[in-house]
Image (spheres, coloured by chain):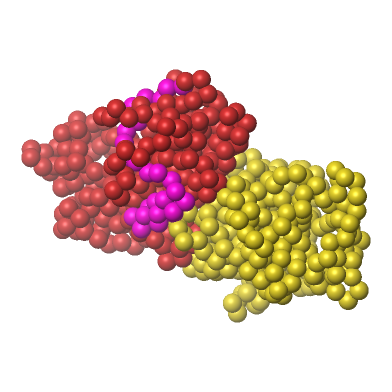
Chain colours: A red, B yellow
Amino acid sequence: MEQFFNYDDLKDLYDIAIIGGGPAGLTAGIYAARDNLDTIILEKNFPGGQVGITEIIENYPGFPDGIMGGDLAEKMFLHARKFGVQVKNGICGKIEIDGKYKIIHLEHSVHKIKAKSIIFATGAKPLHLEVPGENKFLGRGISFCATCDGAFYKDKVVAVIGGGDSAVEEGNYLTKFAKKVYIVHRRDKLRAAKILQDRAFKNPKIEFIYNCVVKEVKGEEKINAITLHNRVEEKDFDLPVDGVFVFIGWTADTELLKGMVDMDDSGFIKTDEHMATKIPGIFAAGDNRLKELRQVVTAVADGAIAAKSAEKYIEENF
Amino acid sequence: MEQFFNYDDLKDLYDIAIIGGGPAGLTAGIYAARDNLDTIILEKNFPGGQVGITEIIENYPGFPDGIMGGDLAEKMFLHARKFGVQVKNGICGKIEIDGKYKIIHLEHSVHKIKAKSIIFATGAKPLHLEVPGENKFLGRGISFCATCDGAFYKDKVVAVIGGGDSAVEEGNYLTKFAKKVYIVHRRDKLRAAKILQDRAFKNPKIEFIYNCVVKEVKGEEKINAITLHNRVEEKDFDLPVDGVFVFIGWTADTELLKGMVDMDDSGFIKTDEHMATKIPGIFAAGDNRLKELRQVVTAVADGAIAAKSAEKYIEENF
């Protein structure tokens, strides 16, 4: 990964600059580089995106036994590198349109990346609870990633907030470590897929708390309880826990393009079926795009389509 | 694969019947069965579709060294089976709408499949040359699949017809066997991806013939030549060859739905972004759908989306 942190080999001009190195960005890289286009991926964290911090992925076709998220991320990273994609660590601070060209200004760096087209594949980030005590315990008891932090809760009691696929799946996963997992959901039934629900119902370490929302996260040095509000009975009560895992949704990581392209209220980018935004030469792919189903399979399809569309755009405009 | 040819365990009613067991159909199966839906896949040939007869697939993310088409097909088949999808060999003769239910009538069988929804993932099939001599030599010198038939042409001379990705990729592949490969294209330059072109240009066994179309396939017991017409010079000439591989395009395998759902002139099915056709409960996914990019990555995405859409349709209508 030496090249990852080294900007000495940046080229003066790229055909395609891809912002974000998750499945959508890496697949765009595979397709672009295989077609001999000069391609760079800029990733602010580590390649793989959300996949890299997912315990196991059961539904990416071709891996019948499932695959560890980190392993799939690495395979996709190596796959893109194999065809010659440059992958660099860095944060995009600003995107400037200079005639037909696009200039990416990097934060904490004098370097700029100039490209004929951009594929914006930055993914999405978790929604916070927005309640008192949450900020105080961020990273010290409040987590958005069971794979990252689950192991810290061996024989402890944790609450999972949410009722969708992530909440129930990660609730199951957390029983590997925790002695007790509460799944706290604001409605009277879960939204998660049936197979996930069935697994959770059978898991003796999991207890469900319905119709409740979090009002406060309490503790001195560490979390010792959350205050829940039962919306049906209109009563508050404290639930003693050592940690809180929040899975209540996502917002697109698209601040950079705000005001430039069309988005919905959560920041998800509106594109046509070719992944084109309203700015010629800027495409969006993956979880940051406004669409129904956010999965690895749909991210890789977006990435491939965006690369092919960018290739056409370049052929027609340069 | 015993179950594949045995209809004794057919259920009275399925949630989702998937017609076609390529990447789109198998992925729809993975997603549907993982959500505990009763799911059956009907495949008229062998699971994997076009993937199964592709030599190597370099651009399905997660396999950095590429993967043999047959291997990927088998992995996807096992993946679907793992979650409990029934996969049956059979040909769908007719689709009947019976109120909310869909009845699939099988050819050469008394069995019927009744389902709440159908995902139509039948793929597409190759276009023929439609010239004298072609039918005579179908399967005996005319081929649409280099992986199937290439090995029969060891040290022989073959012509590849076409100028797109498939023609140039398979032309390269055929040089493993043939001593000489002509790539005959009707235009003055290729449509194939640059990386494929570059490989072919470097391959000493390949010779390009531009601006030419096939007028006739000639021979007694075996093919001995094709008559080509040069469209620029307006002249005909005979090219001695032992075999002809045709890669001039595809048409969707959608006869069954003709007149029922919207299609384009080539039979590609028009859907919305949820893969819905205009008949409630009938969805289309994969290569048989009207779209720009037909690849494994887009097929698996279509399959996942179609399964989730069918699941919603069932929840709302049954």
Residue, x 84% and y 52% (percent of image)?
B213
Looking at the rendered image, the quarter that the C terminus of chain A falls into is top right
Front-lying residue, B80 or B45? B45
* Left or right position of B304 against B251: left
Whether residue B317 appears in this view of the structure is: no
Residue range of the region highlighted in magenta in the rendering: A70-97
- Going 42% across and 59% down the picture, which residue do you hit? A58
Residue toward you, B131 or B209: B209
Give residue B94's position: percent from left, percent from top.
78, 60
Residue B168, can we see it? yes
* Residue B265, x across and y down, in percent: 80, 44
Q: Residue at x 53, y 54 (%)?
A: B59
Residue lying at 59% horizontally and 33% vertically, measured from the top left:
A313
Which residue is at the far front? B204
Q: Is residue B268 left or right of residue A30?
A: right
Q: Is residue A180 magenta?
A: no
**Can you name the residue that lies furthest to the left here?**
A221
Query: Residue A163, how many percent across, how many down?
Result: 36, 45
Q: Answer with left or right where residue B281 lies relative to residue A167.
A: right
On the image, which quarter does residue B202 sit in? bottom right
